[in-house]
């Protein structure tokens, strides 16, 4: 099965599943244009982008309410200082220390040990 997300103003507003044979039976990216034509033939309007359940392309598997930045699907940033990586994952400005018991402190933009 192929999954498609409708994009409106950079937000995912709807998600649908399309049979592989309705996408030409091929792989992404070739399957996307065929799937988009099939979706249009059903009367669905707007921009539809293929998304990967296994996160093989476009970062995360799209869900309603997620953002599309032109490259990846992603959720909201957990903190203002974090940056989005090429896989659609939010990264802290400094790597989290190894082990359990750490939390991010946005005021100091540092990891703080939980005691």
Image (cartoon, grey):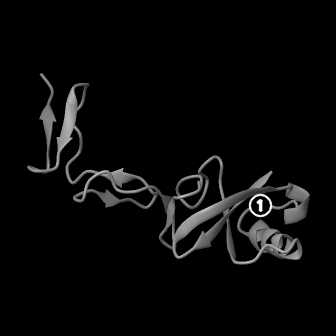
Reply above or below: 63 against 112: below
Residue at image coords 84%, 64%: 23
Q: Secondary structure at mark 1?
A: loop
Asked where in the image residue 29 lies, by quadrant, the reply is: bottom right
User: Mark 1 highlights which residue?
Assistant: 27
> Would you say 54 lies left or right of 27 here?
left
Q: Position of residue 10 (x, y in %)?
A: 51, 72
> Which residue occupies 47% across, 71% down?
69
State the quadrant of the C terminus: top left
In the rendered view, tell whether residue 49 sits above or below residue 97: below
The x, y position of residue 57, in whole percent, is 60, 59
Q: Is residue 69 above or below residue 107?
A: below
Q: From the viewer's perspective, is residue 16 above or below residue 40?
A: above
Q: Position of residue 110 (x, y in %)?
A: 13, 45
Q: Nearer the viewer, residue 31 or 70?
A: 70
Which residue is at the far top?
115
Res. 16 image quadrant: bottom right
Residue 75 locus on image (x, y percent): 45, 55
91, 105: nearer the viewer:
105
């Amino acid at each position: 099965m192929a999954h498609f997300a409708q994009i409106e103003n950079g937000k995912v507003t709807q998600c649908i599943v399309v049979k592989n044979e309705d996408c030409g039976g091929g792989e992404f990216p070739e399957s996307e244009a065929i799937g988009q034509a099939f979706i249009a033939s059903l009367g669905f309007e707007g921009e539809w982008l293929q998304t990967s359940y296994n996160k093989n392309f476009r970062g995360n598997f799209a869900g309603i309410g997620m953002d599309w930045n032109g490259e990846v699907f992603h959720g909201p940033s957990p903190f203002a200082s974090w940056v989005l990586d090429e896989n659609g994952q939010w990264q802290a400005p400094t790597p989290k220390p190894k082990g359990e018991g750490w939390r991010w402190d946005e005021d100091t933009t540092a990891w703080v040990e939980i005691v």
